[in-house]
Image (cartoon, helix red, strand yellow):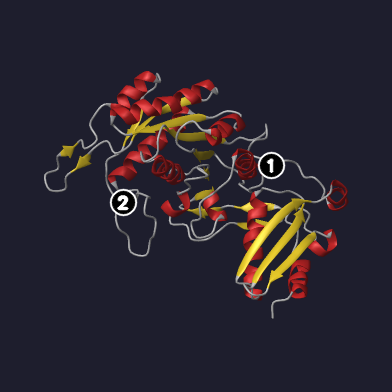
Amino acid sequence: MLTKQSVIELLHKMKDPFLHKTFEETEGIEEVLIKEEKNHVSVKLAIAKTNTAEQMQLQQELVGALKELGAATVGLRFSQLPEEVIAKFQPTKEEDPSLLSKDSNTNFLAIASGKGGVGKSTVTVNTAVALARLGKKVGVIDADIYGFSVPDMMGVEERPKLNGNKIIPVERFGVKIMSMGFFVEDNSPVIWRGPRLGKMLTSFFKEVEWGELDYLLLDLPPGTGDVALDVHNMIPSSKELIVTTPHPTAAFVAARAGQMAINTDHEILGVIENMSYFESKVTGEKEYVFGKGGGDKLAEVLDTTVIGRLSLQQPFEEDGVFAPSVYQEEHPNGQEYLAVAKQIIEQF
């Protein structure tokens, strides 16, 4: 039977994700309420750091454990432990292995677009996979917090795990992946404002055990909003790919994203023109369904070059492989992405 005492006993055994001490030891259980008529449990916990990826992981574990205990619905709130409690249990500080540290040898590559729907995330995923196919150690941060899609595109069905106070990213096709999509349930919308989003992005850089990476790709939100600006300001140095379609309006809007990169001292590596054409399997002729010239015009405006033109095609179907947006190496677009990856390597 679900009782306040049974909930407290459960919470006593669970640990603060940063201090690695039980909530009984930290006295972090601030409130437990049960609405018996609805079988609803409401819990308030004090932890060492709030609004982090670790908090989201803890939240998932708590919801699962409380539902196993018999709760129909669960409400969770978090506050920060007093500084004296944190100091009492604070583990010895290790040397910072953060990707943002001055000793990091990782190359940053941001993928941006002026608007949604031009295939920016598809370009991110396939460029990362192509770099991995060329023997590089690659990671992807799905920084499109409101429109996360990388896990689904790559067919990822598992979630990150914790190793001490570090998050272990999920790996597929030789690429390590971190996304907000791992920390929400049932494709729920993310209703957060700027400060919380900034903290989550910082966690993706500093609190994930990436290991050694040659390249870290960032799938930026479309446009020039707060999240994109946070990422631009957070990364010490980065190069960028700007994604557009051949349509003149898409290229016009994408120029704003390119200008944002220039204004934040990020070098534009090149333009990717996605959905450049459709090649008929019947006639072999190319049909320019979105027009022509958008990529070239954008490259001219940004004083760069078009380094890839991708056709409008689906990946090949493979039995037993679910990855709806990853092109196989032998696929025409897979070959085009390999060519793009080679140019990226040459320019870093």
As helix, strand or loop, the secondary structure at mark 1 comes to loop
| Amino acid, disc 1 | Pro
Q: Quadrant of residue 300?
A: top left
Is the residue marked by circle 1 packed among few (<14), some (14-19), or many (20+) residues within 10 Å?
some
Question: In the current view of this chain or complex, which residue is farthest to the left?
Answer: 283
Q: Nearest the camera: 337 or 65?
A: 65
Q: Residue under circle 2?
A: 315
178 w.r.t. 322: above or below: above
Q: Nearest the camera: 189 or 239?
A: 189
Q: Residue under circle 1?
A: 97
Seen in the image, is 53 located left or right of residue 23? Answer: left
- Name which residue lies at 45% across and 41% down: 131
**Count of marks overlaid on the render:** 2
- Name which residue lies at 27% across and 43% down: 312
**Place of residue 107 in the rendered image (x, y in percent of width and height, measured from the top left):** 55, 34
- Name which residue lies at 35% across and 24% down: 298
299 w.r.t. 285: above or below: above
**Place of residue 160 in the rendered image (x, y in percent of width and height, measured from the top left):** 58, 56
**Place of residue 213 in the rendered image (x, y in percent of width and height, measured from the top left):** 57, 42
Look at the image and tell me whether residue 22 can be seen. no
3D distance between C-alphas at marks 1 and 2: 37 Å
| Amino acid, disc 2 | Pro
**Place of residue 279 in the rendered image (x, y in percent of width and height, measured from the top left):** 19, 42
Is the residue marked by circle 2 packed among few (<14), some (14-19), or many (20+) residues within 10 Å?
some
Question: In the current view of this chain or complex, which residue is farthest to the front?
Answer: 37
Seen in the image, is 57 located left or right of residue 339? Answer: right
As helix, strand or loop, the secondary structure at mark 2 comes to loop
Sooner in the amino-acid sequence: mark 1 or mark 2: 1
Q: Quadrant of residue 126?
A: top left
* Quadrant into which the N terminus falls: bottom right
